[in-house]
């Protein structure tokens, strides 16, 4: 069962601001790609919350 990822209001707004900045500086495709990668990583962590332990121990 996947855990629910919750963003605080401040975190959500900061994320939006960062993506907007990336879009202005590097274009829609780059900003969209980064946002998708972040959401994908969060999705993986919600299903496998201990997945980061594999990277810490290497």
Image: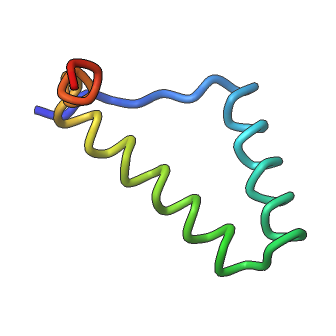
Residue 28 to residue 48: above or below: below
Seen from the viewer's position, the closer of residues 9 and 21 is 21
Seen from the viewer's position, the closer of residues 54 and 58 is 58
Residue 30 to residue 3: above or below: below
- Residue appearing at x 79%, y 62% in the figure: 22
- Residue appearing at x 46%, y 58% in the figure: 37
- Residue appearing at x 86%, y 58% in the figure: 21
| Residue 55, image x, y percentages | 26, 29
Q: Quadrant of residue 26?
A: bottom right
Residue 57 to residue 23: above or below: above
The image quadrant where one finds the C terminus is: top left
- Residue appearing at x 45%, y 51% in the figure: 39
- Tell me how many marks there are: 0
Pick out the residue farthest to the left. 1
Q: Quadrant of residue 33?
A: bottom right
Q: Is residue 2 left or right of residue 1?
A: right
Seen from the viewer's position, the closer of residues 54 and 10 is 54
The image quadrant where one finds the N terminus is: top left
| Residue 46, image x, y percentages | 27, 34
Q: Quadrant of residue 20?
A: bottom right
| Residue 56, image x, y percentages | 28, 21
What is the image's colouring? rainbow
Q: Is residue 8 left or right of residue 54?
A: right
| Residue 17, image x, y percentages | 82, 48
């Amino acid at each position: 069962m996947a855990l629910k990822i919750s963003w605080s209001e401040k975190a959500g707004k900061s994320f939006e601001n960062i993506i907007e900045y990336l879009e202005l500086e590097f274009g829609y495709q780059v900003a969209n790609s980064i946002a998708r990668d972040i959401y994908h990583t969060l999705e993986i962590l919600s299903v496998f919350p201990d997945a980061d332990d594999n990277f810490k121990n290497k």
